[in-house]
Image (cartoon, helix red, strand yellow):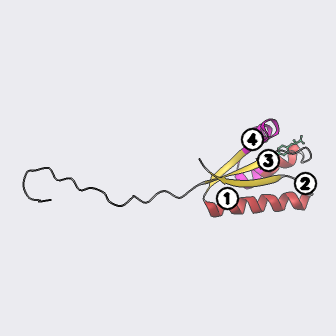
Amino acid sequence: PSVGNDDAVVLERRTQRTQPPQMYQVVLLNDDFTPMEFVVHVIQEFFNKDREMATQIMLKIHLEGKGICGVYSRDVASTKVDQVSQAARNAGHPLQCLSEPVE
Ligand code: TYC
């Protein structure tokens, strides 16, 4: 296209813009054995929620089977899963934690 006159010049984008990084939601699953109090403590400790919010999330998991505790980059989500899984194992509880891509 010629530039420098009064005609409109439209340059077509031929490359895709850089996409934001994929985010991952870290989820806790319900089970019949892990004490509610332990789950509340885990959510407070590893997902930086206050006691009230942690209790709400725990009850949602208890009633609905699973619940999102936070959304993070892949590396941070993976670390959360490892930390929670290790804490549950150490305490002898079957609490399951996993991460899944958002959307
Ligand atoms: N269902 C458990 C109980 O009744 C409580 C619980 C909640 C366990 C959330 C796991 O991710 C969980 N003691």
Instruction: Kindly identify which residue carries mark 1.
Output: 77
Return the residue at label 2.
93
Query: What amino acid does circle 3 point to?
Result: Leu
Question: In 3D space, how far apart are the residues under numbered discs 2 and 3 (Cα atoms)?
Answer: 12 Å
Q: Looking at the image, tell me whether mark 1 or mark 4 is earlier in sequence order.
A: 4
Residue for point 81% across, 35% down:
63
Which-is-in-front pick, marks 1 and 4?
1
Residue 6 in percent (x, y) is at: 8, 51
Badge 4 marks a residue whose secondary structure is helix
Circle 1 SS class = helix
Which quadrant of the render holds ligand 1?
A: top right
Q: Which residues are magenta?
A: 43-67
Q: Give the CA separation, mark 1 to mark 4.
A: 17 Å
Of callouts 1 and 3, which one flags the residue occurring earlier in the amino acid sequence?
Answer: 3
Residue behind label 3 places its C-beta within 8 angstroms of ligand 1: yes
- Disc 1, disc 3: CB below 8 Å? no
Disc 3 crowd rating (10 Å Cα; few below 14, some 14-19, many 20+) is some
Mark 2 is on which residue type? Answer: His
Q: Which residue is mark 4?
A: 57
What predominant SS class does the magenta segment belong to? helix
Where does residue 16 sit, x and y in percent of width and height? 39, 58
The residue labelled by disc 3 is 29
